[in-house]
Amino acid sequence: MKEKVRVLVVDDELIMRDSLSDWLRLDGYEVTGVDNGAEAIERVKKEEWDVLIVDLKMPGMNGIEVMQEVRKIDRGIPVIIMTAYATVDTAVKAMKEGAYDYIVKPFNPEEIGLTIRKIIAQQRLVKENIYLRRELRRRYQFKDIITKNPRMRDILELVKSVAKTASTVLIEGESGTGKELIARAIHSSSPRGKCPFVAVSCAALPETLLETELFGHEKGAFTGAISAKKGRFELADKGTLFLDEIAEMSMKTQVDLLRVLEEKEFTRIGGTKPIRVDVRIISATNKNLKKLVAEGAFRDDLFYRLNVVSIQIPPLRERMEDIPLLAEHFLEKYRIEYTKKVGEISEEVMNLLLKHDWPGNVRELENTIESSLVVTKSNIINLEDLPDSFGTPDEKSYRLSGKKRLDEVEKECISGALHVHNWNIKKSAEMLGIDRTTLYNKIRKYNLKKC
């Protein structure tokens, strides 16, 4: 559940202050009213507010002066000025000083409610844009690739060195290990970092469509080609082209790709004019390319062109020490995204995460944490919150038996405490180290009755 919007109403008239506060509470806002500007300023210093509604005419500091002081503390708080003395001059002055809006008394409660909803919607967009810009800046930085595994740290040192060059890079590793993340980190830290990073999956398209996707086509090149289209090579000019699942590329497309790597130019399908490009190639695969070359399923000359620098990403089961770090990182990420107050992962869940083989690697771990956070009704991720699909049959059995065992132990402890204190709720709660409300909830949960 999202946090309530907090509104501070500042008005020296008790009736207006209370009436407005009551109206806003009915709309679902958390409202506090104060009767003077000095107290409002102190509240802004000590607490966080989403909106301030300030009367213009008040003893001591007027509404404009209050707004000016508030903006010195936090320029981001939207302020609505309200007054019974509307003039063009005061309205203009209020807006010039930074008021979000100016409302004349008496006003319709729905009018001010609509204004607040607009403010909240706008603030949400601003926060989302700030978050997205921050994510774009930081997401693919080396410091944000989370690991304490020595092998991964060696890889990151190699990646830092490779980023400074224009060498082609081949990244190998199982699905979900983060091959594209490494590719983007290389690009963002390279001299090409401000130019396009263009990704294409070689397994997602059949041969003819992949050729069109890579090299583009001219108008009329084939049925349905109603206009010319740039390919990924052109779109990635001066930047980086990431070829994912390169092992799935057909032999014909492999020949065409080799020609581009050697000659730095290509021709659109249906075209005759060579197009020169300056593109760095980073490719990735979850298969053993050397074995495919030996079997004749992948061209050896293309392999050597792509494999100038080789990076092998270890699977998550070989870097188990990273699981707690990654799990906490994903918990924080989705806690913010879903605005949920889930603060930790239970010891039982963490033990299970550490025992799991992770065939889907980091991607599977991220999906598991996100799913668990979405469904939990607690502020802790427990065994029952894990997805039904998670784990081997033995791990699923452990989850069920573990839950049963924990519930049984808790029920016995509570029953014992109640028996010792002859169902004195206060003393039983103190013995258990919980509050009385929690104890009442547990009694109902386990259907405990006094004998």
Image (cartoon, rainbow, N blue to C red):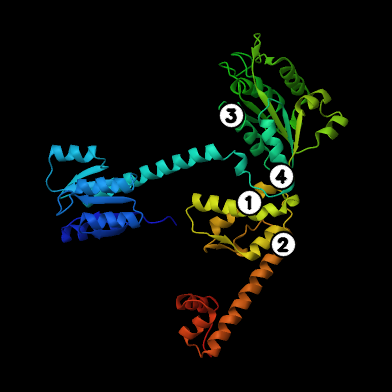
Check disc 3 and give the amino acid type.
Answer: Gly
Query: In this rendering, would 302 be left or right of 237?
Result: right
Q: Amino acid at mark 4?
A: Met
What residue is rendered at 27% in x and 46% in y? 79
Q: Circles 3 and 2: CB distance less than 8 Å?
A: no
What residue sits right under mark 3 in the picture? 193
What whole-number distance in Å separates the C-alpha atoms at marks 3 and 2? 44 Å
**Residue shown at 12%/40% (left/top)?**
87
Q: Are marks 3 and 4 in contact (CB under 8 Å)?
A: no
Secondary structure under tag 1 reads helix
Q: CA distance from mark 3 to mark 1?
A: 26 Å
Where disc 2 sits, the SS reads helix
Q: Residue at x 16, y 54 (%)?
A: 60
Residue 191: give its label. none
Report the amino acid beneath label 1. Leu
* Circle 3 crowding by C-alpha within 10 Å: few under 14, some 14–19, many from 20: some
Residue placed at 61% from the left, 28% from the top?
198
| Disc 1 target residue | 326
Q: Is 206 placed above or below 44 here?
A: above
Tag on residue 152?
Answer: 4
- Where residue 383 appears, as percent x and y from the top left, is 63, 64
> Quick one: label 2 or label 1, which is nearer the N terminus?
1
